[in-house]
Amino acid sequence: MELPNLIHLKKWVDVLAKICSNPDDLHSWDNGGFLPIHNVCFQDNVPMNVIEAFVDAYPESVKLKSQSCGLLPIHCAVHHYNSTNPAIVKFLLRHYKEGASEKEVNGRTPLIYHLLVCQSPSLDTTKMLVDAHPDSVRICDKEKWNPLHYAAYRGNWEISQYLIEMYPDALLEENIDNRTPRGITVCNGRYQLADKFLEAEEDIQSGMMKITEHLDQVDTIIDNEPDQEDNVDNKIFDSLPIESISTTISTERAPDEMDNEGADIIQRTLPVQDKDYSYSRSMHDRLVYDWN
């Protein structure tokens, strides 16, 4: 029996025997554009020694993307519909840590792919992927969905809290449909979860407003300080090179400019108002299967 069929039938003893007798089979692409390691990582409840045997026999395979969708083995390992084996994810990351930053054809990292496809995403898997590539919490796919959008879509507050701690600005980012993560919860009818997202948004807004208030106080103190330049000998001022004076002036920020910047910060952090979030029920299918 051919190796792909053995993998599909989960005949792991025969799979191991096949690897030993015909290691070149691990280099063969199937009609779907996948290597055997992709197919074995797609399976759930794979014995750890099977994954180890695949990587030992063909180490470079952990870095190879599928020909059709651009999936790495790590993408396949975190995609399981109901659950993911953290031990396998950890093993693959140990052999190719950079895989946590790689994107498939729709711009989805393994972190995004896990939160999108797995119906019950794992906090442990999420943390492993973020630890391997911390910037993955900031990366958006081609639809401008960040990981927090997908955690909100799954209705997982535990993972959402972790992602918010790692990257609070994600709360205010809008996807291609102009929806924040809270907007995703509203359009899915998860109103209690939407309230939690709103509280988090208000915390971010409050923190930024405190920063703005501090800047305003500093400006006031500076404006109220007595002008000490009158006490400076004019001869000393006259002796300063013209270039140094112009340079100093050019680097100073006008108070009006600072006020405008503060206003922009506040405006960007205003909570998104609830509106009509009617959404197609085929959203999940569009997100998962729209490879092109």
Image: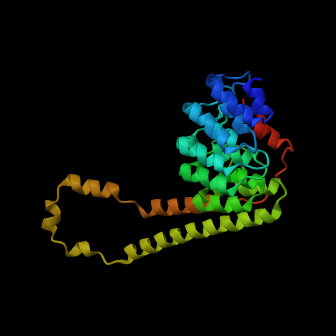
Task: Kindly tell me whether residue 69 is visible in this rendering.
Answer: no
Residue at 76% x, 39% y is 288
In the displayed structure, 44 sits above or below 276; it is above
**Left or right of 230: which side holds 186?**
right
Task: Identify which residue, 220 or 100, lies in the foreground.
Answer: 100
Task: Identify which residue, 259 or 101, lies in the foreground.
Answer: 101
Task: Identify which residue, 83 or 13, lies in the foreground.
Answer: 13
Residue at 61% x, 40% y is 52
**Left or right of 210: which side holds 200?**
right
Q: Which colour scheme is used?
A: rainbow
Image x and y of residue 195, in percent: 76, 66
Task: Kindly tell me whether residue 83 is visible in this rendering.
Answer: yes
Residue at 35% x, 59% y is 252
Image x and y of residue 251, in percent: 34, 56
Residue at 75% x, 58% y is 156
In the displayed structure, 45 sits above or below 164; it is above
Q: Quadrant of residue 233?
A: bottom left
Q: Quadrant of residue 209?
A: bottom right
Task: Identify which residue, 35 or 126, lies in the foreground.
Answer: 35
Image x and y of residue 243, in percent: 22, 52
In which quadrant is the C terminus drawn? top right
